[in-house]
Amino acid sequence: METQLKDLHPTQGQRQPKPELSERSESIHYEGSTKDDRSLLKPESSSSSTSSSILISNESLEELEKKFAAFVRHDAYGPMGRGELSLEEKVLLAIAWVILVPIRVVFAISLLLLYYVICRICTLFSAPNREDDEQEDYAHMGGWRRAVIVQCGKFLSRIMLFAFGFYWIKERFRIPDNDDKSSAALNEVKDVCEEPERPGAIISNHVSYIDILYHMSSFFPSFVAKRSVAKLPLVGLISKCLGCVYVQRESKSSDFKGVSGVVTERVKEAHQDKSAPIMMLFPEGTTTNGDFLLPFKTGAFLAKAPVLPVILRYPFQRFSPAWDSISGQEKDDPKLYAYNLRRLMASEGNLIYSDIGLPEKRIYLAALNGNNSLPSVLHQKDD
């Protein structure tokens, strides 16, 4: 299924052409330069800067964009939103900051407060479901309370998208074709009588925080979040009503199952029980600019349950939101399962394969910010 989120502009702008990449990209080796540690995006203030130094900076930026193509923004504001803007664009931005942004922020906060009150009322006198000291939620609550939380959550999430300028959302669904017509004819009665397998998880590419609002408005699934999210004002209770799985990285207890174990159990539960909340997972592990598909982590496929792939695309004119069912024996092999699903999503969404990931993204962002210790970024543990 491919979902296109359209912004407030009636016409779509032309995007820069995608770089041509082979299916297996070259290995990336970053060599820190001690000659010039200046940020690539900050113009030199000294009047003694020459055109040759500017040329070198531009060439370095182009080289970075080729190596880290999956993270490069192609909009009017340039990498990190620091590109040179025309006078017209500056005037439009000034008007937006003075008028449009405050209105949207106030409206969004009002919707958040409204939904918090709804969740608070529906969870009164109800104890949260607890798996252990690390995980608790209200997503396993049934009856009218759960129905109100889900339906209001979907509706208000869609209103929130509207407030952010996503007036129209175009959705396209793909129903798998059966090439074996004779087999389809033989199993016609069986197919009519039996319902399709319920997916245990929704698998999606990751472009921006807006992804979460869209998935809430369509599926109202459970997400993976940091444990600190559960303690945030307003958002904490809402995350528990969503049934989020919390990551407690600092826990060292021997009986702690870890996020992978909890997610696997929740995916199995969602597959087997229609009343259980379905899991929403981003197997790439980080965000891209929406044109590429990074390698999938296999945690979402350990449960050996069917999944629902969703592809998000954001057609835009000036501003890119990118800041910065499968069956068969393959489910017994999580790596093969992840590989085949990634291949399907890349084919259906016209996305480009990329073998880089979060460590390379950190290197790219550090380079844009003029970080001197770039090689060490590659060895940091993924969050």
Image: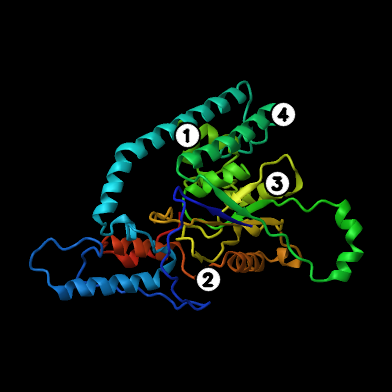
The mark that comes first in sequence, 2 or 4, is: 4
Residue drawn 56% across and 58% down? 283
Mark in front: 3 vs 2: 2
Residue drawn 61% across and 44% down? 218
Question: Quick check: can you spot residue 247?
Answer: no
Counting from the top left corner in percent of width and height, residue 342 is at 60, 66
The mark that comes first in sequence, 1 or 2, is: 1
Q: Quadrant of residue 350?
A: bottom right
The mark that comes first in sequence, 3 or 2, is: 3
In the foreground, 268 or 361: 361
Q: Which mark is residue 270?
A: 3
List the residue tagged with mark 1.
231
Counting from the top left corner in percent of width and height, residue 79 is at 33, 60
The mark that comes first in sequence, 1 or 4, is: 4
Q: Which mark is residue 353?
A: 2
Residue extending farthest left: 48
